[in-house]
Amino acid sequence: MAVSFNQHVDIDAPGPQVWELVCDPAKWPLWIEQMEEVDGIGSLAPGAAFAWRHGDERGSGAVIELDAGRFVLKLATRIGDDERTHTFDVDKSGGFLGIGGNDARVRYTYSFDPPGGMLGDFVVGGNPADSLRVKNTLHKLKQLAESLSRTH
């Protein structure tokens, strides 16, 4: 049974610009909390594989879903048998009720199947470290997107 951590952040930048940032693997290390380095990915498309590094950890990854119409990107990262999914959903409507405004809302869902069955789900579900990773990732994305938006 998968455990998920979901959070969102509002970003003062146009949705399409935030989407471009989310879809740029060269920039993932600037904002994805557990990716200091990404290699081996050419064009972003479903099935595209990549390698990543965080400190001494090295793993592989793949693009599971890329929906440019809905602005949804889903990645899977893996170290050995441990697979994690990262889903980024950019709401491009902006503004109050989608009227005007120059903002986007990004939802990030981080999920995985912890070992240990239901007990593992219970223990991990209350894990503040994973919740903090999601929060930090969104905070970094917000900072980067807003700084890039000011320069355009």
Image: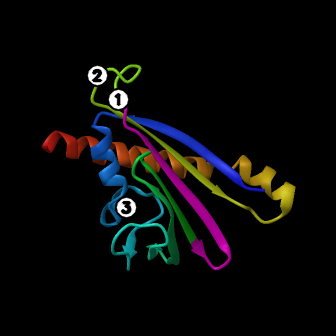
On whether residue 92 falls in the magenta region, the answer is yes
In the image, residue 89 above or below residue 120: above
User: Do labels 1 and 2 touch, CB within 8 Å?
Assistant: yes
Which one is earlier in the sequence, the residue at label 3 or at label 2? 3
Which one is earlier in the sequence, the residue at label 1 or at label 3? 3
Name the amino acid type tagged 3. Trp
Please tell me whether mark 2 sits on a helix, a strand or a loop.
loop
C-alpha gap between disc 1 and disc 3: 23 Å
Please tell me whether mark 3 sits on a helix, a strand or a loop.
helix
Residue located at (86% from left, 55% from top): 118
Name the amino acid type tagged 1. Gly
Q: Position of residue 40 (x, y in %)?
A: 38, 80
Crowd around label 2: few <14 · some 14–19 · many ≥20 (10 Å): few
Q: In the image, 115: left or right of 58?
A: right
In the image, residue 71 above or below residue 28: above
Q: Position of residue 22 (x, y in %)?
A: 37, 54
Residue located at (33% from left, 59% from top): 30
C-alpha gap between disc 3 and disc 2: 29 Å
Which one is earlier in the sequence, the residue at label 1 or at label 2? 1
For residue 94, which numbered disc appears in the image? 1
Q: Nearer the viewer, mark 3 or mark 2?
A: 2
Segment tinted magenta in the rendering = 78-93
Residue located at (41% from left, 20% from top): 97
Q: In the image, 83: left or right of 59?
A: right
**Residue matched to label 2:** 100
Q: Quadrant of residue 13?
A: top left
Q: Quadrant of the N terminus?
A: bottom right
On whether residue 99 falls in the magenta region, the answer is no
For residue 28, which numbered disc appears in the image? 3
User: Do labels 3 and 2 touch, CB within 8 Å?
Assistant: no
